[in-house]
Image (spheres, rainbow, N blue to C red):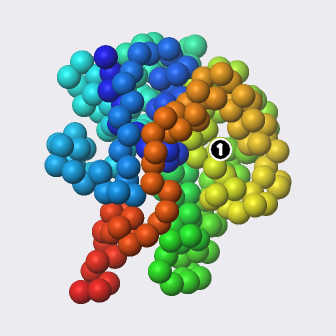
Amino acid sequence: MLTFYYSAAPNPMKVALFLEEAGLEYAPVPVDTRKGEQHAPAFLALNPNAKVPVIVDDGSVVFDSNAILLYLAEKTGLFLPDDMPSERGTLLSWLMFIASGIGPYSGQAVHFRRYAPEPLPYARNRYDFEAERHFEIVDQRLAAQPYLLGDTYTIVDIALWGWARVLPVVMGEHAWEGRPNLKRFVDAISARPAAVRAAALPERHPFKTEMDEESERAMFPGNARLDA
């Protein structure tokens, strides 16, 4: 059985959605990052980068959410463009756009908005602007078609949903204003039974919710250098 190491963060939720959509049998293993469980030796043996998600599938260890989506899609033949391999380049382009743009800029926008130890206007503006710019690109693309690659629901949409569903966390309470196509996209995917099951997965485990000193040490270990 496939083992899925996860938390409730956007990147693990992408993989949870794929697993539920594909109907794959899996064993979920919670990794409470606010308790520092990602730094345990047993977990580092799976992902030396100390991040979720990770899957172990028939002895194969795969980490990074977009790598996992591509691995599972190619293994199962599910949620890929209808016209493969001719559309593989387009698939990879948008998958990497999400991996290198939407995910990192959204994550840093959240960090400097919520967790930075002091206000840093330049950093906030930099990451807010880039997150907004990337989401504007996908909103414009979705104006002409239901999914990022056209009429077919693929792993690119699953990857985008992971971050787009928490857009108000990334951009604030008015995040949906001026982005009707992205809102329609998120609402449609979130209503799918598989997405409902994926979103409910973290409720099975009592993840830590408070951000205290233990959590800050676990999630932002680089801050220790500021006190050195």
Name the residue beneath numbered marker 1. 165
Q: Dividing the image into 4 quarters, which one contains the N terminus?
A: top left
Q: Quadrant of residue 183?
A: top right
Q: Is residue 188 above or below residue 118?
A: above
* Residue 107 in the image, given as x and y percentages of width and height: 51, 58
Residue 195 visible in the shown view:
yes
Q: Residue furthest bottom?
A: 228
Q: Residue at x 35, y 67 (%)?
A: 214
Q: Residue at x 64, y 67 (%)?
A: 129
Residue 11 visible in the shown view:
no
* Residue 217 in the image, given as x and y percentages of width and height: 33, 69
Q: Residue at x 79, y 33 (%)?
A: 144
Mark 1 residue element: loop
Q: Is residue 175 left or right of residue 217?
A: right
Q: Is residue 56 above or below residue 209?
A: above
Q: Is residue 90 above or below residue 139?
A: above
Q: Dividing the image into 4 quarters, which one contains the C terminus?
A: bottom left
Give the residue type at disc 1: Arg
In depth, the one of 149 and 195 nearer the eye is 195
In depth, the one of 94 and 7 nearer the eye is 7
Number of other residues with Cα within 10 Å of mark 1, as a class: few under 14, some 14 to 19, many 20 or more? some
Q: Residue at x 50, y 57 (%)?
A: 209
Q: How many badges with numbers are in the image?
A: 1
Q: Is residue 10 left or right of residue 169?
A: left
Q: Is residue 108 left or right of residue 193?
A: left
In depth, the one of 49 and 8 nearer the eye is 8
Q: Is residue 182 above or below residue 77?
A: below
